[in-house]
Image: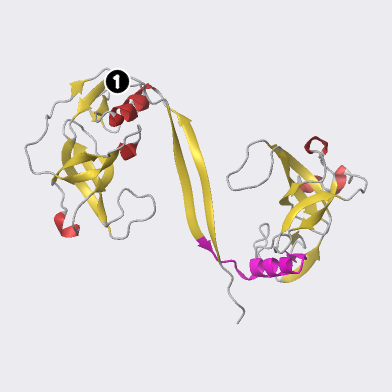
């Protein structure tokens, strides 16, 4: 039985967004150990606050302060915390309706075990030692047996010194990818500096990289076809933002390349030519990474540009 290929993969990017007046007040309030909600058109106090009424869609701005104590409405035990979760020991995810609020806030509850958690239990906010104006300014909730906080929210202007006006929310997905038969054959061919696809037995199109089935006809593919190594730029973009952990100076060109003999364009970086001279129809060839099993980039071959009619179906 052939070896099963697998590789850890990470998809990661920072999501940067500006804040409107309601979200700005909420996050700045957390920095100042103050929890703000917003009153909806029906009088319900929404925590976390939103900028538009979820029922009427009217803009909201009537901010109020609620208590840092509340009641658990539902929960789930997390026995194995993952990277960047609120606590590094087992904890409960809880929905907490803070005193004075009409909706529940999702966060972590520091509890010794699932037997210590129940619906209706009283909890309070444990504030982070260092606060920056983010939901993580609430380190977690903790059990709380004292008297309830005020049930009536207090009007608040939402005004603070040095308000938070934007946030960066990192998004990351870690997973292990195991390719199937077709992709494994494609990857192993790359070790030999060859590019292979598979031909559909129905429409006769050659797909690179192969998928094991024709995306058009839906039938399995098995006939292996070697394509390239040369190809044609069908379309491209100029990248002006430097990617994290990618040692390539901007600007550079990323293109869709139709390898000779393929009926599907794959993507690759174009180098060996000024970025502003890359064009549709440019004939290119691969430059392989030293000691690696993938193409580093494509460069011009010096051939005349391909006629548009030869690749128009792959744009």
Quarter of the image containing the C terminus? top right
- The region drawn magenta spans 176-200
**Which residue is at the front of the view, 282 or 264?**
282
Q: Residue at x 65, y 47 (%)?
A: 247
Q: Is residue 51 visible?
A: no
Q: How is the image coloured?
A: secondary structure
Q: Residue at x 56, y 67 (%)?
A: 6
Furthest residue toward bottom: 1
* Residue 141 location (% of width, % of height): 22, 44
- Residue 210: image quadrant is bottom right
* Residue 202 location (% of width, % of height): 74, 65
Furthest residue toward left: 147
Q: Is residue 297 above or below residue 106?
A: below
Q: Residue at x 16, y 37 (%)?
A: 69
Quarter of the image containing the N terminus? bottom right
Q: Is residue 34 visible?
A: yes
Q: Residue at x 58, y 74 (%)?
A: 4
Question: Does residue 287 appear to the left or right of 182 in the view shown?
Answer: right
Give the residue number, with chain letter if any, for mark 1. 158
**Which residue is at the front of the view, 110 or 280?**
110
* Residue 312 location (% of width, % of height): 81, 45
Instruction: Tell whether position 307 is magenta.
Output: no
* Residue 64 location (% of width, % of height): 23, 23
Question: Does residue 271 appear to the left or right of 130 in the view shown?
Answer: right
Question: Does residue 135 appear to the left or right of 269 in the view shown?
Answer: left
Q: Is residue 309 above or below residue 181?
A: above
């Amino acid at each position: 039985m052939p070896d099963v290929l697998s590789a850890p993969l990470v998809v990661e990017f920072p999501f940067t967004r500006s804040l409107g007046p309601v979200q700005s007040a909420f996050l700045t309030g957390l920095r100042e150990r103050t929890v703000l909600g917003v009153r909806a058109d029906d009088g319900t106090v929404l925590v976390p606050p939103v900028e538009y009424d979820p029922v009427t869609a009217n803009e909201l701005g009537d901010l109020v302060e609620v208590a840092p104590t509340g009641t658990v409405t539902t929960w789930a035990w997390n026995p194995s915390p993952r990277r960047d979760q609120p606590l590094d020991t087992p904890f409960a995810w809880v929905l907490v309706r803070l005193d004075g609020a009409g909706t529940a806030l999702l966060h972590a509850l520091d509890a010794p075990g699932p037997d210590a958690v129940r619906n209706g239990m009283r909890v309070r906010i444990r504030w982070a030692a260092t606060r920056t104006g983010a939901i993580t300014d609430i380190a977690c909730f903790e059990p709380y047996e004292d008297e309830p906080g005020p049930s009536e929210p207090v009007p608040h202007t939402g005004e603070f010194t040095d308000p938070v006006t934007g946030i960066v929310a990192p998004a990351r997905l870690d997973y292990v990818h195991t390719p199937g038969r077709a992709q494994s054959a494609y990857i192993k061919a790359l070790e030999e500096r060859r590019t292979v696809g598979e031909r559909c037995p129905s429409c006769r199109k050659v797909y690179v990289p192969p998928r094991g089935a024709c995306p058009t006809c839906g039938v399995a593919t098995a006939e292996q076809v070697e394509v390239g190594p040369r190809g044609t730029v069908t379309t491209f973009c100029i990248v002006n933002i430097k990617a994290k952990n990618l040692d390539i100076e901007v600007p550079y060109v990323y293109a869709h390349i139709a390898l000779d003999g393929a009926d599907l364009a794959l993507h690759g970086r174009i180098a060996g030519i000024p970025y502003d001279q890359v064009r549709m129809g440019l004939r290119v060839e691969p430059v392989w990474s030293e000691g690696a099993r993938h193409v580093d980039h494509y460069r011009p071959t010096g051939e005349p540009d391909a006629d548009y009619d030869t690749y128009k179906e792959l744009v």
